[in-house]
Image (spheres, grey):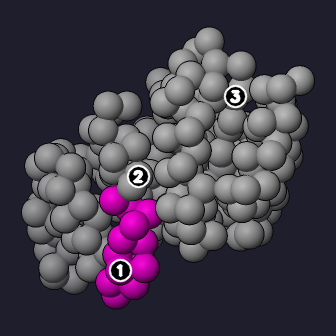
Amino acid sequence: MNRIVPILIAALVVVAGAAYWLTQSADTPDPSQTVIAQADNASDAGATDSADTSGVIEMVMGSDDAPITIVEYASFTCPHCATFHESVLKPLKTDYVETGKVKFIFRDVYFDKFGLWASMVARCGGPEKFFGMADLLMKGQSSWTRAGDPVAIAGELKKIGRLAGLEDAQVQACMQDETKAKALLAWYEKNGAADDITGTPSMIINGEKHSNMSYADLKKILDGLLEG
């Protein structure tokens, strides 16, 4: 399980012009490249305080009438989350979500700027494309996260966007959306504190927090709730 560091939010606040440009040239910004800035000082942590989170969409699979609700907190750069996505979420979706037994909600966690970028890319195509994008990001995590410098990683994220049918310009615009970035950070900060999230992947199952587990162990919990 990846542990969440308290200074995370301060390190991730995205402020236009604050730290660096992702460009091909150190002198002249290239509009074809993604432009993202990162604040490094803890004093910037307050930048999310006034962020409007009303436009942040919950990413949901399953019926609203399902007897069980699972909220997963996960990061796109967390290896344990990628494993969970493949070995637990896939069978969970088949056995419980698609059969109307579980409503599943995915909430993004940000350990680093690349996880934030990935989240913004995953959300770029809206709720209809989110889980498909999440599949691609988790499956290819070991590749795109190790692509090299920030420019290379941004390029790999654009490639994933293309696989999902998004244009490069659309993905770039999503990654440059400062207002959305601050809203996501504030939204996570609020929800993570309310649910006492200290690491990923974590699950809230009908209001009770659980840490990472095998599908067999999760199945026992779910079947117990359904039988009860």
Q: Amino acid at mark 3?
A: Thr
Task: Please report contact status of discs 1 and 3: CB closer than 8 Å, yes or no.
Answer: no
Q: Residue furthest front?
A: 227
Marks 1 and 2, the one that precedes in the sequence: 2
Quarter of the picture containing the C terminus is top right
Residue 210, given in percent of the width and then of the height, sits at 83, 49
Q: Give the residue drawn at x 64%, y 19%.
A: 66
Q: Which residue is mark 2?
A: 134
For label 2, the SS is: helix
Residue 205, given in percent of the width and then of the height, sits at 78, 36
- Against 12, is 185 above or below? above
Viewer-nearest residue: 208 or 188: 208
Viewer-nearest residue: 200 or 206: 206
Viewer-nearest residue: 41 or 1: 1
Residue interval drawn in magenta:
136-148
Q: Measure how far apart labels 1 and 2 are at the Cα level.
A: 14 Å
Q: Which residue is mark 1?
A: 143
Q: Horizontally, is 135 left or right of 33 in the view?
A: right
Q: Give the residue drawn at x 60%, y 56%.
A: 88
Please tell me in which quadrant of the rendered image residue 117 appears: bottom left
Q: Amino acid at mark 1?
A: Ser
Q: Measure how far apart labels 2 and 3 are at the Cα level.
A: 20 Å
- Against 146, is 169 above or below? above
Please tell me in which quadrant of the rendered image residue 6 appears: bottom right
| Mark seen at residue 69 | 3
